[in-house]
Image (cartoon, helix red, strand yellow):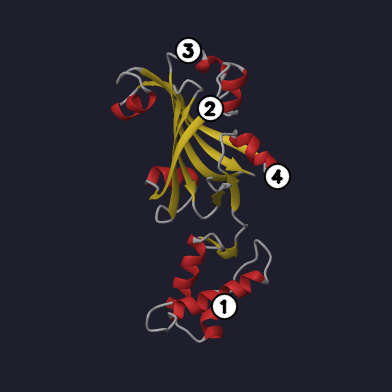
């Protein structure tokens, strides 16, 4: 609430639209801007601002030339070292991946430092769009030291679970990971792959996984659509 105690007009309208959304089913078409403006006796620019925030929050979905629809609830994904495939299935969704790149490239300075290898050493570069029920949720880029996993390019089906392959085929044991989460904007290329607007906020997650000896296994950069997915974890008090 602002210090002067007045609620901005668009925010009050946003609350009214949220009430309307609660009465509609997922996929329902929202009335046109002009109808909402007349109903709430405000300018169309006020309606537009309220709807824009609701699209950013994932409550509405705007489709060019078709209108604005009630969006599906966000998928809430647990933060864990479990496979994306296993986690999504446990939540009742059908996971899949679209492979963008699966190749061996030289490590740049940043990746080399993270993986404790020499700059220029070969790394396996795996880039995939992550989908749930056919909808793009995230763009995941994984780098692994090629010398430690020389057969990975041969044994991994790139659209399948990387973790399952590492554990079952190569005997890799995941012990811990450091993960950083922050907001970011997608590049035009990333927005195109994720089928979203580059102006919408994203969740950027960067993970470094290690085995029981502390040796780095992988570096992962994941860019998730902030309007379609959220994350949760369980916290316990320190004693």
Which of marks 4 and 2 precedes in the sequence?
4
Residue at 51% in and 74% down: 14
Q: For the residue carrying disc 4, how many other residues have a C-alpha within 10 Å: few (<14), some (14-19), or many (20+)?
A: few
Which of marks 1 and 2 precedes in the sequence?
1
Instruction: Identify the element where label 4 is drawn.
Output: loop
Residue 33 appears in the figure = no
The CA span between labels 1 and 3 is 58 Å
The CA span between labels 1 and 4 is 32 Å
Dot 4 corresponds to which residue?
92
The CA span between labels 4 and 3 is 35 Å
Considering depth in this image, is 228 or 80 the residue closer to the camera? 80
Q: Above or below — where is 174 with respect to 235?
A: above
Q: Horizontally, is 201 left or right of 30 in the view?
A: left
Dot 1 corresponds to which residue?
16
Disc 4, disc 3: CB below 8 Å?
Answer: no
Farthest residue to the front: give it.
Answer: 239
Which of marks 4 and 1 precedes in the sequence?
1
Disc 1, disc 3: CB below 8 Å?
Answer: no
Dot 3 corresponds to which residue?
150
């Amino acid at each position: 609430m602002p210090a002067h105690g007045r609620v901005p007009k668009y925010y009050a309208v946003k609350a009214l639209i949220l009430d309307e959304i609660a009465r509609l089913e997922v996929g329902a078409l929202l009335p046109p801007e002009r109808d909402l403006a007349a109903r709430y006796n405000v300018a169309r620019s006020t309606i537009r601002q309220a709807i824009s925030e609701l699209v950013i929050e994932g409550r509405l979905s705007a489709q060019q030339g078709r209108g604005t629809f009630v969006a599906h609830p966000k998928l809430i994904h647990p933060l864990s070292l479990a496979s994306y495939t296993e986690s999504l299935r446990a939540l009742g969704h059908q996971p899949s991946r679209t492979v963008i790149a699966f190749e061996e490239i030289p490590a740049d300075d940043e990746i080399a430092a993270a993986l404790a290898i020499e700059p220029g050493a070969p790394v396996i570069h795996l880039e995939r769009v992550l989908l749930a029920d056919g909808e793009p949720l995230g763009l995941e880029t994984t780098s692994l030291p090629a010398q430690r996993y020389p057969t990975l390019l041969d044994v991994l089906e790139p659209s399948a679970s990387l973790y399952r392959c590492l554990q079952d085929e190569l005997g890799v044991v995941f012990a811990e990971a450091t993960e950083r989460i922050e907001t970011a904007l997608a590049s035009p290329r990333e927005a195109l792959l994720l089928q979203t607007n580059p102006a919408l906020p994203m969740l950027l997650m960067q993970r470094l996984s290690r085995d029981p000896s502390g040796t780095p296994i992988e570096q992962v950069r994941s860019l998730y659509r902030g309007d379609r997915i959220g994350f949760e974890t369980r916290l316990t008090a320190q004693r």
